[in-house]
Every structure is written in structure tokens, then in C-alpha cells.
Amino acid sequence: MTTLIDFITEARKRGFTDKQITAPLLEKGWYIKQINEAFLALHPKPKLKNQICIFLSDEILELLEKRAKKNKFNLQEQIEDILRRSCVNKSTTIKSEKNIDDLLLTCFSRAQRKKKS
């Protein structure tokens, strides 16, 4: 496992994206589970209760990876950042003294959906 982690670390230093790193590893016989575990070992994330699966076109994925690299995020962190900012910016009419969790809850509340109708 440390060999895999070292390889990923070195490839990232050279500017390769996670997608570009994963493809040759799969070709060399590494299992996707091992690769994902190595990526997680580099940036451990807490297990989340809720998960969302999204499918992106290659063009959008490339744009997100470029933005993530510019912001020094990995792809998952970049998508989380975009979603968080989108939800909070949508709530600009909400009083500013509420904390960010209240803002996010308000965005997805049923009361907010009824106002739109």
C-alpha cells in the first residue's frame, strides 16, 4: 500500500490529476478498491451519512478538475465547495445572523419550495 501511496503522491507533485493517475494503475493490475483506499489514506475524510452519486460529462469533469487544481482541492472537495457556496448564495435574502447550517436547511426546506410555486 505504501508503494501505491508514494506513486500517487509523486504523480500529484508532477501535476497529474487523480483521473490521470488512476487509469495507468488499473492497467497495471491494481484493483480500484486499493486505489481508492490509497487516495483516502492521503486525504482521509470522515464517513458521511448521506452520499450522492452524480454523473458528469468528460468536459465538465475536466473543467472541475482544472478548477480544483487551481484552488488546491481534490475533485470531491471542489464539488462540495461549489454546492455549499451555491446553497448559501441562494439564501442572500435570509437574515445574516443565522449560521451556515441554518442557511443550508432553509434552502432545502419545504416552506422555501412553497414560496416558489
Image (spheres, grey):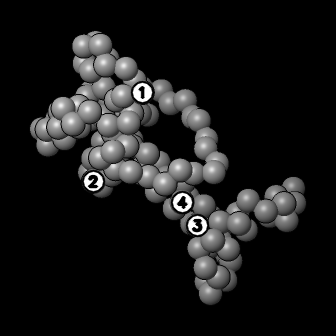
How dense is the environment of label 1, judged by Cα within 10 Å: few (below 14), some, or many (20 and up)? few
- Tell me the quadrant of the picture where the C terminus can be found: bottom right
Of the pair 91 and 71, the residue shown nearer to us: 71
Alpha carbon separation for disc pair 2 and 1: 24 Å
In the displayed structure, would residue 24 be above or below residue 94? Answer: above
Question: Residue 90: which disc?
Answer: none
Q: Amino acid at mark 4?
A: Arg
Q: Is residue 65 visible?
A: no
Please report contact status of discs 1 and 4: CB closer than 8 Å, yes or no: no
How dense is the environment of label 4, judged by Cα within 10 Å: few (below 14), some, or many (20 and up)? few
Relative placement, left or right, of 18 versus 107 is: left
First of labels 1, 4 by sequence position? 1
Q: Percent from the top left, x then y, of residue 5?
A: 23, 37
Alpha carbon separation for disc pair 3 and 1: 34 Å
How dense is the environment of label 2, judged by Cα within 10 Å: few (below 14), some, or many (20 and up)? few
Please report contact status of discs 2 and 1: CB closer than 8 Å, yes or no: no
Query: Residue drawn 57% across and 34% down?
Result: 54
Question: Residue 33: which disc?
Answer: 1
Residue 33 location, quadrant: top left
Alpha carbon separation for disc pair 2 and 4: 17 Å
Please report contact status of discs 3 and 2: CB closer than 8 Å, yes or no: no
Q: Amino acid at mark 3?
A: Val
Please report contact status of discs 2 and 4: CB closer than 8 Å, yes or no: no
First of labels 2, 4 by sequence position? 2
SS at circle 4: helix
Front: mark 3 or 2: 2
How dense is the environment of label 3, judged by Cα within 10 Å: few (below 14), some, or many (20 and up)? some
Question: Residue 72: which disc?
Answer: 2
